[in-house]
Amino acid sequence: MTNAVSLTIDGAVRHLELSDPDMPLLYALRDELGMSNPRFGCGLGQCGACTVHVDGEAVRSCQLPVSAVSGAVTTLAGLGTEAQPHPLQTAFIAEQAAFCGYCLNGWLMTAAALLKARPRATEAEIREGLSGLKCRCGAHMAMLRAVRRVAQA
């Protein structure tokens, strides 16, 4: 038996037929819709690679069942465009804030939600807001500079 589910993702209504409505949103986005972001990192909600926005709030999609999604979902693909990138995307490029780039989805999506809530976030607020994210390559300092650049703009 399948369950019909409709989700608004990056501004478009997407219809899914899911055998398990409690499937994590991450799996629906990647496996059912073929999206390359968000990323699977730990599967435990600890690293942040799977972060998306639901009604503007950053959530770990590996821990959120599709049945619990009650608002519009924004992925990294919906954050900005190539023609009009989000200010964070521009800052990350300017700061060269990536080595392998696997974790960037989580950093960008978490920082975007943070700066939406606190546009002029202080250094302490930025560090606190991004504290749960992981980067195995060690690009943390460049990413923090990029977020600080947008908060100070």
Image (spheres, grey):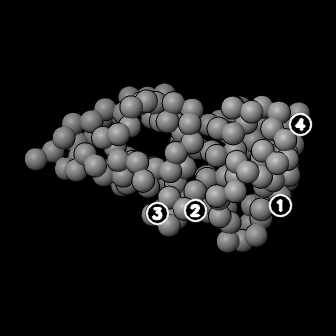
Where residue 27 sits: x, y (%)? 37, 54
CA–CA distance between discs 3 and 4?
33 Å
Exactly how many numbered labels are in the figure?
4
Q: Is residue 95 left or right of residue 106?
A: right
How far apart in space, not on screen, are marks 1 and 4 (Cα)? 16 Å
Quadrant of the image containing the C terminus: top right
According to the picture, the residue beneath numbered tag 2 turns out to be: 47
**Rendered position, 47 above or below 127:** below
Q: Dot 2, crowdedness within 10 Å: few (<14), some or many (≥20)?
A: many
Please tell me whether mark 4 sits on a helix, a strand or a loop: helix
| Residue where numbered disc 1 is placed | 141
Q: Secondary structure at mark 2?
A: loop
Residue denoted by label 3 = 44
Which label's residue is closer to the chain start, 1 or 4? 1
Mark before the other along the chain sequence, 4 or 2: 2
Cα separation between marks 1 and 2 = 17 Å
- Callout 1–callout 2 Cβ contact below 8 Å: no
Q: Are marks 3 and 2 in contact (CB under 8 Å)?
A: yes
Three-letter residue code for mark 4? Gln
Specify whether residue 104 is in view: no
Q: Secondary structure at mark 1?
A: helix
Q: Is residue 31 visible?
A: yes
Q: Amino acid at mark 3?
A: Leu
